[in-house]
Amino acid sequence: MKSEVKTEVTRGNSLIDLFWKVFATSQDKPPLSEDQGVIAKTFNKYRWQVFSSITLGYALFYVLRLNFSVIKKPLMSAGILNAQQLGVMGSVFFITYGLGKFVNSFLADRMNNKRFFALGLFLSSIVTVLMGLTNEYLPLVVLWGINGWFQSFGAGPCIVSLNQWFSNKERGTFYGIWFTSHNLGAAFTYVATATIVSAYSWHMGFIMPGIFCLVGSILIYFFMHDRPETYGLPNVADFKNDHAAVVHKDKSVGALQWSVVKRPAVWILGLSSLCCYIARYAIESWGIIYLTEAKGYTTLGASGVLGVMQFAGIFGALTCGLVSDKLFNHKRNMPALIYGILYATSIALFVWAPANPMIDMASMCLYGFTMGALVCYLGGLMAVDICPKRATGAAMGMIGLLSYFGAALQEVVSGYLINSHLTIVNGKKIYDFALAADFWVGSAVLSCLLAAMVWNAKAED
């Protein structure tokens, strides 16, 4: 009996050792060259390859995440799932994603993120294809939950890689540019998936994006890179001569990560992001159903409105880093407050204004622009700014855990509120979104108030 237990422990340790051997960041190499011109040329080439990989790669993660938002309507129309079941599915996804983002973002501080990032996208692609091969509730729930875990391999490695290849003074600008990736992926998904579903079936709305992103994951593996030091290059602070004051020089990565977990400002930012994500995923998860059921749009027309929202989000994400870096001296608090007020206003206009294509389009443009900026700030950048650089992944993990708890809560509450006020008139199902809309707007307002509570939080490194 003892030998069997010992064998199992040894086998478990072997698997852990194998995992670290494959995915842990490589050892530092001696300097690549004494010629600074060669160093600069190689460093710049590699960092642009990294930046392209995380930007395009994260867009593909969103293709595999938001295609379900378009497929919800056909699933309801076919009688396969109802609104409450869809809410449970969405909640399961966000729970596994939030937990996974917490764990995997902590791991990302120690990982070869080239391999970790590409693997997550590859496995998410496989699961998405499998979802297109079933039409039963339980398998769909299980697969969607598994997809949430693999989706969590995305954000942490992206932010850690960004910090490894871009300096402190560049961070806000390039974070904002990278953050447009989710808008690009979402905009493409709304239009492409709606077209695929309309032309073929909801099954193909899973299968075709899954195959497309699987190919993308293979390409990313060949273009992304590990830390600069593993190629004989200097760290980015030395390369750019951009050194922050080092407060925790002698602390281990684990100790720094624990300091992030204990910091009240990080928890407040996380709660603010939680409320922001309730409103965000309310629109992204239920927006198409809301427009088709409450305002009479077709599925393709509603997808077009939300697609425009995502393109507006690109401009919000692109400019928010520049705005805070150039106009507010790298401070995020004031622009976050401004964007937060406009964010709540846009959602209120969308759900409370009468049906009008011009008003709906305008409200979604304002929503997209402010969401692109606000989620960039609250979803990571403000926490990264005030936490030690060597614990970037931990900061993202904390914010991600709370953010996606909010997204999961939103799915359950929204699904319940929408389904519980269902009425049937002449055999047709009529959904009432009034209470759900109040919930969405209230969450956006609370997010804004919480963000104001960390106005004077100080940065550490």
Image: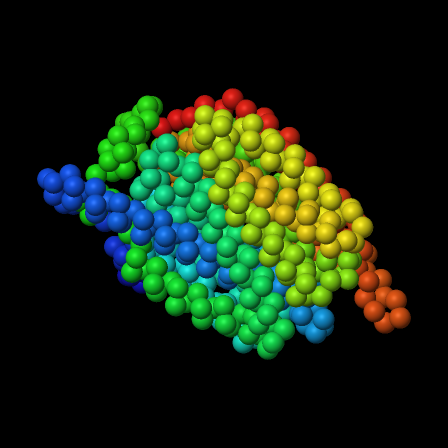
Quarter of the image for residue 82 reads bottom right
Q: Nearer the viewer, residue 234 or 85?
A: 234
Query: Which percent across, then down, holds residue 227?
Result: 27, 45
Along the line of sight, the residue nearer the viewer: 127 or 19: 127
Image location of residue 90, percent across then percent down: 61, 57
Furthest toward the left, the residue is 34
Judged left or right of residue 435, residue 196 is: left
Left or right of 136 on screen, residue 331: left
Q: Where does the N terminus fall, quadrant-wise?
A: bottom left
Count of numbered circles in the view: 0
Q: Is residue 75 above or below residue 441?
A: below
Residue drawn at (31%, 42%) of the image: 165
Relative height, residue 304 to residue 275 (above, below): below
Q: Is residue 3 above or below residue 385?
A: below
Q: Horizontally, is 412 left or right of 252 in the view?
A: right
- Please provide percent x and percent y for residue 240: 27, 34
- Residue at 88 percent across and 67 percent down: it is 425
- Quadrant location of the C terminus in the rendered image: top left
Residue at the image point whose x is 29% and y is 60% from the top: 222
Left/right of residue 234 with respect to residue 192 in the rendered view: left
Q: Is residue 333 visible?
A: yes
Look at 73% across and 49% down and name the residue there. Answer: 359
